[in-house]
Structures are given as structure tokens and as C-alpha cells.
Image: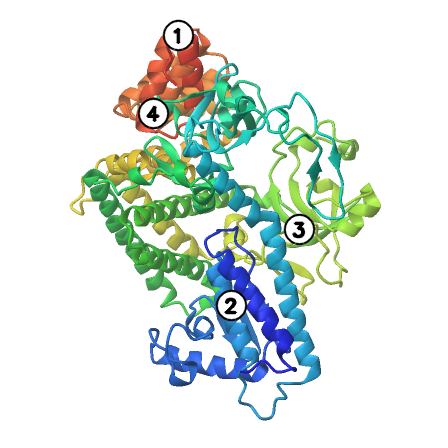
Amino acid sequence: MTSTAKNRVPVMLYRQLLGWCRKYQEVPFNPLPPVTLEPPLVSASSLRRLCQMRAILSNNKINDHAASEFGGNRHHPAYYALYGETVSVSSGLITFPEITSASQLRAIIRSVYWLNNHSSDSTEDVTAEGRTKDQISLAFDALRSVNQLSSSELDSRQRKRDLTIKVRRRESSLPNAKFHVGQIVKQRRKGWRGAVVGWTVDEGKNEKKHKRLSSLTTKQYTLSAPNSETATESPKSRSIKYTILVDMNDSSLLHESKTVNLEAEEDLISVDNPHLQRIHNHLVKQYFDRFHRSHFVPNRLLSFTYPLDDYSSEFESENLPELAQASAAIVRDSLRIIESIISIISDHIGDDEEYDELALLSTLLIDLKRNTAAIEDTSDENEAAMLAIKWMYSFHVRVTAMQWARRVNKRVKPKIEYSLGQIVRHKLYGFRGVIVGFDEKPRIDVSNWDGLQGVEDASEKPFYHIRPDINDCTKAFGGPRDFRYCCEDNLEFISSYTGGPLELATDLNEAEWRWDPATASYTPSQELKFMFAEEDRDNLAFVVGKISDVMAEFLLQVRDGGESNDQTFSLDDLFVQLQKGADNLDDATLTQDLIKEIWKESSDRRLRRVLDKGVAALLEGKNATAMAIFNEILEQDATYHEAWNKLATVQWMLGHAAQSRGSAMQSLRHSGDSNFQALAGLGLADMEDGNFEEAAEKFQRCLEMNPWSMVSARLAVCLDKRDPEKSDR
């Protein structure tokens, strides 16, 4: 298309945008949000044609070449819009996914320009003044946005990259940077550890300050003689300063209250002890892709900015046959148990005429099939194993929590006056709210609450979890409230309520709650009804119980080493995954949490339920009750090592240090020395007694089993206390 007077401006803007993309094609940036366009910003007729072509290609499973009218090659401007799997197109709308690179942005710009300048629909006036102005405005907005991106982020990133390359190559008399991005270091004086997330050259302070002259431009001028010694700063005054992500456990233990800190090079030393190199900081995932061997691997932004800090020579895939074998076993057997549970659910919902009444089973079935597809579609065996572990943990905890909550609430339900989803009003303060949960008695101390002064024995009355109307709260309290915990005696049901949904500070989860205008109340999901014993279908409880039993039996087989004929993977496989496959804190946490859940299992299902009761008492601060429950369990099964571990915990909290130590040793013995929680507890006891040598030994054993354990912070302290001069960091 020639550049005539009527399209000179669009062409100019198009070329400038493409020029920007070429200039910054090698510079990475943080993802930009998705872009959605609709007419008149994009041609309606072109959108219709594009939608038709994508439908044809999809129906014919064509994904490697374009139709003849679209150019038939990858260089055609509309190729991305036509074949992009993450591009969503309808007859009146096109949405491009989040933008992660200049090359992707270039593909979007070319697609949009082509759509707006390639319309064969004679009924559409492609030169209409109004539409052209809108499209030109879109181009101006795009150009303004990318220039802002380059000035605020990309230019400085490129300059930083150039500087770090010069430093690594020892150019321009720049100081050498001793530490690398991703390396683990320790603050010499304060003792905390951290991961290097960046470094820069600190120019130091000049002995003589230059007087600055301002100008009408952004350029700055200085007054100094051409040969003045102070015109150029002495290289000797330059030094390297590092930005450090501080280990949060170190920060807490050492009372530093730091998350990120800027440190001079002379104040840092390298951490070479492998037990101390996995840093816990919630910002790690923003800057690093994973942990590898002895350091964190920089993400694409850091790798670009610090290219010569890259550890790429060490990133070659390692041959870990033990990990490969463990991952394959975990994937194989998790898919097998998922298939078994799918079969159980399908047998029941397939024969039940009242399908809607079994919506919970349908929800579970969808979740199981989605996880099966995710695991099977993952080509990397280790990643697939982590997905399987995530499913096993989340599904087991979900089903166990459902059954536990149902047992508790079924017992207390006769004492509860109001139901989930009902709209109630507070008698004293007048605010309305929706009931989202209830307790037989308050779970916290309410003896000094102002609103309960007129309620007799409030600590023995049912309490409700209320999501209040924000307008009512503003009138009652002077501002909105997200949550209220109210005694039943202070509530009244609004039987005459005819209004719509309440205005809540935070919307209720749409998957769990639905507003029912017919009853002027919120309808909870069947899962919530099941948990709060407001669902009375016996067949539903039977199926959930059967699923729970099958899952528990599977985890017992894992715990006992895969002794069944099915050759179930063993607990050892999970430890291999934890030690060699989990390369980030999230994956490690999931794996260790699944191991803990397996330890809780017992061949006696009743004892497992009693253990849950003891844990609940412990979490509610009822330590004496919890201790009695754990002792009761151990009288019936003295080999239940997780009961010993929980008993050791509550004994420690009650100040019975010697007894706690003995219980922890029993837990360790009956677990085959694998219960890293018990080992950590023994190390903590030694540390409290000042036996730093013994504590360090136990913490190191714990970290050998669970490299991501939080006891690394205590190990660091013990090593410093044991031998401040020689301890290896």
C-alpha cells in the first residue's frame, strides 16, 4: 500500500513502532498485560474474515502453513493473529496474550496494522474519518507506551548490562565484582545469609563537589578545568555494592527485620556449606528460576543484565538415574490411583438420576480429569512428578478436611440455629451480614468483648462467621469491615428481607456461593453443605468416605515401601524427589507436606481420626487435652511415630523438656531415623541447652533429609557459636 496523503500518518507511526521493536528486540522486560481490541480500533470486516479462517484451520487441524490469501508464510504480517494459539479471536473482538518480548510486540503491531489496512468488504468504509482517527489514536498510545517503557526500564537495563560487562572484563579501571548474581553470601558482622540479586559500582564521594548548571534540556554540565584532578573521580574510590535477598528465618532469628539489603563487598563472605545455601525469601521466585547445586539460577531479566555472571556452564542437565526412577514411579502410581478414584465416582454419578444432587462428585471428577491431563501432558518427568505430588497432597487434604469438618459439625448441628447463606442482623450494632460458617463455641477468648457484656456464658454459646454489609458497617463502626465473629444470642434472622445481594468488602467466591433471589439468601456449594452437615444424602457421604479410604490405603502402601503387588512407589522415592528434584521452596514445601501427611496415616482409621482430634486441640491452644489424646493413641499403638512427634511438640510447649526429648527420640526410632521434624526438635533442645556441637550435628542430619528445612538458620547460628573463626559458611 503506497504512502498517500490519507495514510501517511498511520504508516509513519507503524514504522516508528517497528523501529522501536528492532532497537529493543534483545532487551527483555517484565510481561505487559494482554491487549484486547474491538471495532473501531480494529477493522470489523477483517476480524470476521480472521475468525472464519481460524475456524477453518482449526477444524482441519492445520497449524503449519497459512491459507493462500494470508500469504502462506511465517513472514506475513497477520501470521501471529492467524496461528497464535494464545490469541483469542471472535467476530467482534481480538485479544492478544501478555507481551513478554519486543519480537512478540512486533508480531502484534504487524497483525493489527494488516487487519486495519486489508479489508475487502465493500460495505465497510475503510477510510471513514472517525475510524481512522481512532486507529491513529491507538497507534499514538502504543508509541507513547513503548517509549515510556524504554525510558523507565529498558534503557537503564541496557546501560546496566554494558556496565556489568565492563566490570567483569576489568575495563576502564573499574573494580572487580567478587560475588555473582545468585550466589549465597553472609554478612560478616550480623551473621545473616542471603542471595545476591544484583550489584553495581558505587562511585564513592568526591573530595571536591562540582557546581552544576541547569539547562532547558535533560543534559547536565559541570564546571571544572580540563586537566583538573577532580574532573575525573579516582578509580580507587569506586567499590562494588550488592543487593541481597535476606533469608527470612535468619532475619527473624537475629532480630534484623530485613528482606532486602544493600551491602558493601567487604562486609560479605561466601557461603560454601551446602546445608546453608537454600535461602528462604518470598522474593526469590521473582528473580530466580530455580536453585541449582550451590546457587540460584537468574531469570531472563537478571541473565540479560548480568550476562557474565551466568552459570550456564553448570546448567547442563545432570544424569540422575535415581531421580528419574523415582519420578517415573510417582507419576505412574499417582495416575493409577487417580484412575481408581475416577472409576468410583463415575460408577455412582452415572447411575444416579438426581445428578444435580451429586454436584460435589462432579466437581471432584472434573478436578481429577484436569490433573490427569496436566500430568500426562508434561514431557519433563521431574515436573510431572511434582504435579503428581501437588495433586496427591491437595486432594488428600481436601477430602480429609471435608470428612473431619462433617464429623464435627454433624455433632454440633442440633445446637446451631442459623444456616449457611442466611442474611442476619446484629441486634446491638444493626449491621446485616451473611453466615459463611459457625462454631459450637468460640475458638478464641471473647471474655472481654464489649458486645458480649449482656450475654450470659458467651464462651459456651455458638459463634458465627459473618461477612457484613460494608454500608451498614460504615454506619455502625465508621468504616467497612471484611469479617465479623458473632455470638448467636446477638443475631436475628431477617425473615422479611427482600433486597438483593449485600455489598461486601470482598466478594464471596463464586465457586462456593451463589445468590438466590427466590429465597433472598446465598446458596453455598454442595462441598460447603457437606462440610457443615447441611447435606443429608447418605450416598454422597458413602462415596466420599470410600474415596478417603482408597486414598488412605494408597498412602499407607507408600509409607510401608510399596509392599503391595501393585509395586506402589515408596517413601524413599519422595525423599529422592525432595532432595534432588525440588529446585525451589514451593516444590520442596509440597513434597515435605505430603511426607508429613503420609506419616499421619495409620492402618487403624479410628486412630488417625483421634490424631486429627489431638492436632485440632493443639492448634486451639488446649495443650493438656492434646497431650492426653496423644498418650491415649500411644497406649494403643506404641509404634505410631507421628503421635510420638506430636506428643514431643506439646510436651515442649508445656515446658517438659526431658519428656519432650524422650518422645522425639521414640518418633525418630520408630520412623527409621527419617522423621526430620523429630530430629529438628532434638536439635532445638540441644541448642536451648547450649550444646551447639550436638545441635549442629542434628540440624545437619535434618538438612540431609530435607535440604529446604528452616533449621538451616539455626544451623548457621550453631556453627558460629561453636567456632566463630572457622565455621564454614
**Quadrant of the frame with the C terminus:** top left
Instruction: Name the front one of labels 3 and 1.
Output: 1
Residue 492 x/y as whole percent: 75, 48
Sequence order check, earlier mark of 3 and 4: 4
**Disc 3/disc 1 C-alpha distance (Å):** 53 Å
Q: Work out whether residue 567 or residue 300 is closer to the camera in this orientation and state it.
A: 300
- Near mark 2 (Cα within 10 A), the count class, few <14, some 14-19 or many ≥20, is many
- Near mark 1 (Cα within 10 A), the count class, few <14, some 14-19 or many ≥20, is few
The residue carrying mark 4 is 274
Residue 644 x/y as whole percent: 36, 22
Which residue is at a point 18% across and 47% down the rendered structure image?
566
The residue carrying mark 2 is 108
State the scheme by which the image is colored: rainbow
Where disc 4 sits, the SS reads helix
* Residue 541 visible within the image: yes
Q: Work out whether residue 480 or residue 374 is closer to the camera in this orientation and state it.
A: 374
The residue carrying mark 3 is 506
Q: Amino acid at mark 1?
A: Asp
Sequence order check, earlier mark of 1 and 2: 2
Sequence order check, earlier mark of 2 and 4: 2
Where disc 1 sits, the SS reads loop
- Is mark 2 in CB contact (under 8 Å) with mark 4? no
Which residue is at a point 45% across and 53% down the rendered structure image?
26
Q: Amino acid at mark 3?
A: Thr
* Residue 41 visible within the image: no
